[in-house]
Image: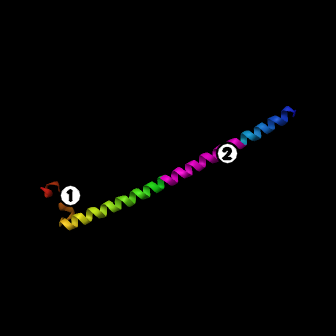
C-alpha cells in the first residue's frame, strides 16, 4: 500500500484533471451553443429578406405604393 501523502497527491492531481476536463467540456458546449445561435440569427435574417422581397413583388404587381399598401383602408 502506498503511503498516505502519495495517495493524497494522486487524488489531488486526479481532481485537478477532472476539474480541467469539466471546464473544457463546458467551454466547448458554450462555443457550440453560440455557434448555433449565430446560425439561427443568420437564417432568420435571410428569411426576413425573402419575405420582404415577396411582399415588395406582390405590392408592385398590384400597383400599390408603399404608402398605399400600408394604409388599411386602401384595400376596401
Which residue appears at 57% of the width and 48% of the height? 29
Expressed as whole percent of the image width and height from the top left, the position of residue 47 reads 37, 59
Quick one: quadrant of the C terminus?
Answer: bottom left
Which residue appears at 52% of the width and 50% of the height? 33
What are the residue bounds of the magenta stretch? 17-36
Above or below, 21 relative to 48: above
Q: Is residue 35 magenta?
A: yes
Expressed as whole percent of the image width and height from the top left, the position of residue 23 reads 64, 45
Which residue appears at 75% of the width and 40% of the height? 14
| Of marks 2 and 1, the one in the foreground | 2
Q: Which badge, 2 or 1, comes first in the chain's sequence?
A: 2
Residue density around tag 2, few if under 14, some if 14–19, many if 20 or more, within 10 Å:
few
Q: Is residue 25 magenta?
A: yes
**Residue 12 in which image quadrant:** top right
Expressed as whole percent of the image width and height from the top left, the position of residue 37 reads 47, 52
Q: Find disc 2 in the rendering and name its residue.
A: 21
**SS label for mark 2:** helix
Q: Find disc 1 in the rendering and name its residue.
A: 70
Cβ atoms under marks 2 and 1 closer than 8 Å: no
Which residue appears at 82% of the width and 35% of the height? 7
Above or below, 50 relative to 19: below
Above or below, 5 relative to 42: above
- In the picture provided, is 23 more to the left or to the right than 13? left
Foreground of the two, 39 or 67: 39
Amino acid at each position: 500500500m502506498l503511503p498516505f501523502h502519495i495517495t493524497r497527491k494522486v487524488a489531488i492531481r486526479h481532481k485537478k484533471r477532472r476539474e480541467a476536463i469539466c471546464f473544457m467540456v463546458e467551454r466547448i458546449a458554450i462555443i457550440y451553443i453560440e455557434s448555433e445561435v449565430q446560425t439561427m440569427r443568420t437564417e432568420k435574417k435571410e428569411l426576413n429578406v425573402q419575405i420582404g422581397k415577396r411582399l415588395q413583388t406582390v405590392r408592385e404587381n398590384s400597383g400599390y405604393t408603399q404608402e398605399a399598401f400600408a394604409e388599411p383602408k386602401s384595400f376596401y
